[in-house]
Amino acid sequence: MEFRIASERGRSQIEDLWAYCFEPAEHPFFQWYFTNCFRSENTLVGFEDNSLAACVHLNPYQLFLRERTIPVSYIVGLATSPEARRGGVAGHLLKAALTEMRRRKHYFNILMPSKAGFYYPFGWELCYHQLKYTIHLEELRGLTSSEGRFSMITCPDQWEMLQSVYEKFMAGRHGFSIRGEPEWRKLIAAHLAEKGYISVLECDGLAAAYLFYQLRDGKIVVGDMSYSSAQAQRSILNFFYNHRSQASTVEFNTPFNDNLHLSLPNPKEGVAVYPFMAGRVVDVTEGLQALGYAQQIQGEVTIAVVDQLAEWNNGTFAIAVKNGQAKVRITDSETADLACTIGALSQLVFGRLSAQELIAGGKLMGKDATKIALLDQLFPKRDNYINEYF
């Protein structure tokens, strides 16, 4: 099978495969995506006998990782034609995608798995979880605040009202997407194209919260929501509560460490851990050298890494950190301090699991307590949150 970057000449085949696997061509999101978001130069295709057998979109993003703004690829729309399935095509496509991302100097990537287990053998591991709430509106009665005033966002030109809220909401968090004017315009246009609503809370003349939502069959379904304070969050709950004539329940996600569930009258129902996004290291050497490290931490550790798809990640890596920077080299040492798969390393680097947790789970092997402690100092566990869907 031949893998290559798509050309505009092959656009119709890519659209047909997307329509077959995901939304039909007449769906509003399909129309918006292929009008405003699709770029042939960010699309990797696999051909067999001159027929499109597989396709994946490598949408460029920037993430806040380890105190740095890091360019990444967000894998979306991985699709294979029905006649090419169960032949290992997806694995070959992902391997080609890793090669292309490395060429682009995207040394990390993310994807939202529909079935996470499909991606585990290829080195992707869950790095982001959220709390999913499905609550009857009546249960919000004692949790609301009427502070502030809500108004509707009706066009992408109003994006700046949302930016300040997002920045306050993400303060202290990790792994989030860096949003600027192009990203906001894309998000707003996509949501409005799907007949959704965007509401912003203003308090004392300043934006304090926003939410992207839809009204579906008696339910408020929230796609994106940020708030600058606990008071603003309670005003959002009041906004939901005031929709009792139109809906009976509300569905929304929050960061994993959100404590709203502690105040719910019936927290045993309607609150669930929601696996959200997987992450992966594309290139161990370049990726670890691109990150920031605590200035006061220094030391060296060697890690033997196994990667089934990217041969450049197979080996023992010596990681030396000093003055907030890492130098990484491949060493011939057969006695590495620690050993893991690329997936476990990804969870460590993204901050989802600590070195101690990986040891306890059997994902990181090694007995040198000093080196394990050094890894936890270099890659402390973080509060990951991201809410991007394409």
Image: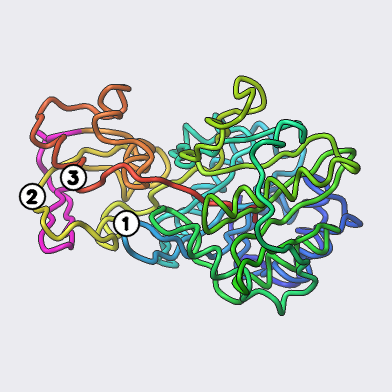
- Residue that mark 3 sits on: 377
* Left or right position of 242 against 84: right
Residue 361: x and y, percent? 32, 22
Residue range (magenta): 317-338
The C terminus appears in which quarter of the rendering?
Answer: bottom right
**Does the magenta portion include 248?**
no
Front in this rendered view, residue 75 or 88:
75
Marks 2 and 3 in Cβ contact (< 8 Å): yes
Query: SS for tag 3?
Result: helix
In the figure, 200 relative to 388: above or below? below
Look at 43% across and 38% down and name the residue there.
Answer: 123
Point out which mark residue 120 bears: none
Magenta stretch, main secondary structure, is: strand
Q: Residues within 10 Å of mark 3 (few under 14, many from 20)?
A: some
Q: For the residues carrying marks 2 and 1, which lies nearer the camera in this image?
A: 1
- Residue that mark 2 sits on: 299
Residue 116: x and y, percent? 56, 33
| Mark 3: amino acid | Gln
Marks 2 and 1 in Cβ contact (< 8 Å): no
Counting labels gives 3
Look at 52% across and 30% down and name the residue there.
Answer: 262
Front in this rendered view, residue 200 or 109:
200
| Mark 2: amino acid | Gly
- Residue that mark 1 sits on: 66
